[in-house]
Amino acid sequence: MAGHTDNEVRIAAPLPFVWDMTNDVETWPALFSEYSAAEVLERRGDTVRFRLTMHPDENGTVWTWVSERTLDRDTWSVHAHRVETGPFEYMRIHWTYRSTPEGATLMRWVQDFALRPDAPVDDPAMTARIDRSTKVQQERIRKLVEQAAAEAG
């Protein structure tokens, strides 16, 4: 059984502003509370390959992996996947952005993955963990982007 999450947040800021701020991988350690570092390894057109490092987990383990994101500004969407999969057989994330009539932005993350048989947790447990974490991170991002948009005028 594979894992799947689907979460959306409404951000009171224009779509291009949200897009630019949330796709600046180098600033992710300030935007996401779970990342201690984000290192861009390569850029090819609209694709960026980067290494993410998390803060130590409850057991003191520091997780790190390489991911790749391809941005499509024409459709306001991003397709990403882990290159170094770690405990996952695969991990794919699709981000979409939509403007609302009142000028806000709906940012949606759909994540599909499967864990390896020897992973420390199973797919349902990881689904619950990712779903909880995504809600926390999207709320944090919402606040930070809205604050930045208000300061930018």
Image (cartoon, rainbow, N blue to C red):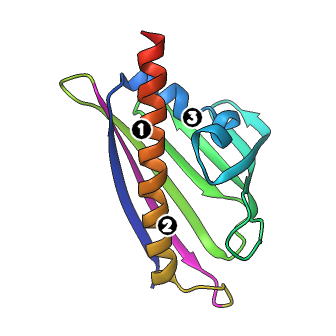
Which amino acid is tagged 3? Asn
Estimate how packed mark 3 is, as few (under 14), some (14 to 19) or many (20 or more) residues with alpha carbons within 10 Å.
few
User: What residue lies at 79% left-to-right and 38% top-to-bottom?
Assistant: 42
Marks 1/2: CA–CA distance: 18 Å
User: What residue lies at 66% left-to-right and 85% top-to-bottom?
Assistant: 119
Tag 2–tag 3 contact (CB < 8 Å): no
Which secondary structure, mark 2? helix
Tag 1–tag 2 contact (CB < 8 Å): no
The numbered mark, 1 or 2, whose residue comes first in the sequence reads 2
Residue position marked by numbered label 3 in the rendering = 23
Marks 3/1: CA–CA distance: 14 Å
Return the mark for residue 130.
2
- Does residue 2 appear left or right of residue 63 in this picture? left
Question: What is the magenta range?
Answer: 104-117
Residue position marked by numbered label 1 in the rendering = 142
Which secondary structure dominates the residues rendered in magenta?
A: strand
